[in-house]
Amino acid sequence: MCRFLLYKGKSSVLIADLLTRPAHSIINQSFDSRLRIDTRRPLNGDGFGVGWYQSEHDESPCIFTSTLPAWNNVNLTRLAEKIKSPLVFAHVRATTTGLASEANCHPWQYGNLMWMHNGNISGFDQIRRKLLATLADEVFNFVQGTTDSECAFALFLNQLENPESPYHTPEELKEAMLQMIALLNKWTREVGVTEPSLMNFAVTDGRTVICTRYISSATQEAASLYFSSGTRFESYKPGHYRMIKSDKREDIVVVASEPLTFEQADWITIPTNTLVVITPRFNVLLYPIKDENYNPQDRHQPVDLSCVYNFKK
């Protein structure tokens, strides 16, 4: 089960403060994932990727990917100590579909849009042909790899009126995400797939961020996802970070498959089958995904992180 994180801030962050320095950074999660559903494969060693925008006015992101394990790539460590960005996507991969190749590493870019996925689309091999057949030519030609995740991105792009537009409203991105999920559910249901799909997606145009914590089941819990927000994300001793909240401002939002810090109060569990919108003005909006898998009577309670991370009282 892959792990991802994203950062959106009014000021730029040194990427090392997200990727390498925290004691439970995403690099550590690549070999020490503690909240994953699939415990049979404990390592996320099938490649990684980092994407970032140089500024809030950057027209397209820069993306660095590799098929090496994230914990064993010296270039990632070097870059992380030098690059600052106000919007960062990072992903460590454990393959479900597709070979270990750079074409299959997250995140992907189309124009100013960037995308990543944690999970799998069950029965993807049975719906892949139908999915690709629905795509506009320019979106079809965009697909270079063999993963369900990249094809889901292409399907998302196909829901946008103009995927090459330099600007998309939060509502437009939100609706495209919901339409994409609905189509995937419809097609897998039509071919008789009964195993639920795990669809934790994240997409940004450099201004708005949309992400989901979703499973195509009304009774099971989706793959873990948390968010933290505040005014400063800083280290108070080596390896230990905390989110500082002052003046009730929201200048920083971090979303992660697993918390990066050992401060329990910093992190809020995103409920299963929820869509999150982080607006250009840093409003964090949570919407229940009210489809056939919505169950208002089964809103899962937050995980007690003290049991997972052995917090010192």
Image: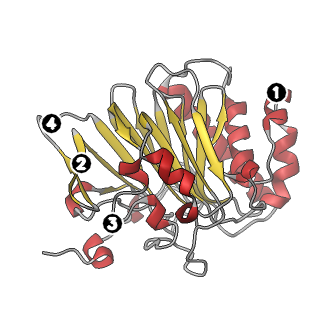
The label shown at residue 138 is 1
The residue lying furthest to the bottom in this view is 40
In the displayed structure, 228 sits above or below 36; it is above
Residue pictured at 86% horizontal, 47% vertical = 130
Question: Residue 45, position in %: x, y?
Answer: 61, 67
- Identify the secondary structure beneath mark 1: helix
Q: Are marks 2 and 4 in contact (CB under 8 Å)?
A: no
Q: CA distance from mark 2 to mark 1?
A: 42 Å
Task: Tell me the residue that label 2 is attached to.
Answer: 234
Residue at mark 3: 301
Q: Tell me the SS state at disc 2.
A: strand
Tell me which label, 1 or 3, sits earlier in the chain.
Answer: 1
Q: The disc labelled 3 sits on which kind of residue?
A: Gln
Q: Secondary structure at mark 3?
A: loop
Determine whether the residue tagged by mark 4 lies in a helix, strand or loop: loop
Is the residue under label 3 in contact with that under label 1 (CB below 8 Å)? no
Residue sitting nearer the eye, 213 or 182: 213
In the picture, measured across the screen, residue 166 lies left or right of residue 267, that is right
Q: Residues within 10 Å of mark 1 (few under 14, many from 20)?
A: few
Task: Report, in whole angstroms, how far the alpha carbon at label 2 lies from the one at label 4.
Answer: 17 Å
